[in-house]
Image (tube, helix red, strand yellow):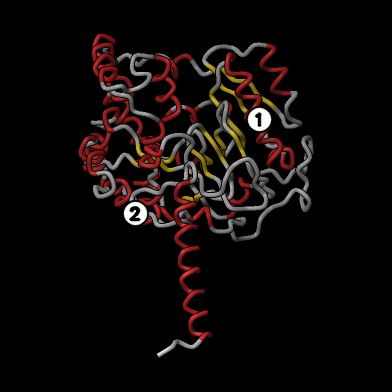
Amino acid sequence: MAIARPIRMLGAACILLCLFLVFQLHQSSSEPGSKLAHGMKKDPLLDPTGEPAGNLWRADEHDYSPNSEQSARTNAALITLVRNEELDQLLSTMSDLERTWNNKFNYPYIFFNDVPFTEEFKQKTQAMTKAKCQYELVPKEHWEVPSWINMDLFLESAKMLEEQDIQYSSKVSYHQMCRWNSGLFYKHPALAGYRYYWRIEPNVKFFCDVDYDVFRYMEDGNKTYGFTINLYDAPQSIPSLWPETQRFLAANPSYLSDNNMWEWITDDVARPEHTKGANGYSTCHFWSNFEIGDLDFFRGEKYEAYFQHLDRAGGFFYERWGDAPVHSLGIGLFADAANVHWFRDIGYNHIPYLNCPNSPKCSGCKAGQFYQGADFLSKEDCRPTYFKYVGTH
């Protein structure tokens, strides 16, 4: 029996629609930096991205002029540990951040260095912004290798790490930097009067106009920590970090937050080889080259005691414990997970990873692109595990 013409047309349309959908799925999955990993079906950044909910402070509604005595700015600063020779890369970062955000809010910059800044550095950075710039020296006692570190053991350990292709293993200054960023930066006298900080680094990019005061958002929402990128670490660089953390928790069980991120920290499904290599730690961490944080959390009893325990254990030198996993474990164990915020609306790039929202306020990156380079980089994305256990807030 012949099929009626309208039914034939409907069937043909359905077939064409299916083919179109298959083509679209193939096209999106083959675009550079778009390959998904660890069971994530769709990158949330492909959905339209707006500002966070709530009453947001805006520059056209409040006084954010640079020298105002009645400024709406809260006690917060932009901070960076930077070398004189990184000036050009830092100016690039400042240019992006001023264009997208700080030219509206004029929060101060505080630059830290283990050696004095040059006059050229001071002049060129101040010329980038109307905001106040402050130049600080890291105290000698905060930068020196601690007296309890055996340098012969350090050199032997560094050689073993180098054989496992762990970057910067034998570079003492890199270990010093990780230690300072982990547990000493918030003790600097220059930050004594501040509550919040936004960490920036040389040679990073900001893609999106941000039209609200992010520090006021943190303060009003009682947020402890904000991030953009969530990655796996190299387990060879931190094999004893989780065992030492467990020893600390065993001695201080009351420090564990009721609403912690234990499952994100200990997941052994997404990358079981990482969890095994790190002796029970998934190695998931917030990439701390971008972080917006509450200094009171780091100054608090729990985190400070945790850092002191880790510092005495020696892993900042005998292994290559970075500030990213140390901050992440501290936040994930001792903070309320509800007070950690994913700044999905802040477009950001630190080579080779990106946070790129689907927003008309963004330019220079492709929505949903997570990495630049070969597809193996997609494996380093720990957001699926974070979204699974913690959420997308």
Specify the quadrant of the image occupied by residue 121.
top right
As rendered, which of 246 and 69 lies closer to the eye?
Answer: 246
The numbered mark at residue 94 is 1
- Residue drawn 45% across the image and 87% down it: 3
Q: In this view, does 97 lie to the left or right of 336?
A: right
* Residue 83 location (% of width, % of height): 55, 17
Specify the quadrant of the image occupied by residue 87.
top right
Residue named by callout 2: 39
Q: In this view, does 208 lie to the left or right of 140?
A: right
Discs 1/2, front: 2
As rendered, which of 16 and 220 lies closer to the eye?
Answer: 16
* Residue 271 location (% of width, % of height): 27, 44
* Residue 95 location (% of width, % of height): 68, 31
Q: What element carries label 1?
A: helix
- Residue drawn 30% across the image and 27% down it: 237
Q: Is mark 2 on a helix, strand or loop?
A: loop
Specify the quadrant of the image occupied by residue 169.
top left
Q: Which amino acid does label 1 sit on?
A: Met
Please identify the residue farthest to the front as the structure is shown.
Answer: 1
Please identify the residue farthest to the top as the structure is shown.
Answer: 152
**Crowding at label 2, few (<14), some or many (≥20) Cα neighbours within 10 Å?**
few
Alpha carbon separation for disc pair 1 and 2 = 36 Å
Quick check: can you spot residue 259?
Answer: no
Q: Quadrant of the image for the N terminus?
A: bottom left
As rendered, which of 55 and 36 lies closer to the eye?
Answer: 36
Q: In this view, does 344 lie to the left or right of 122?
A: left
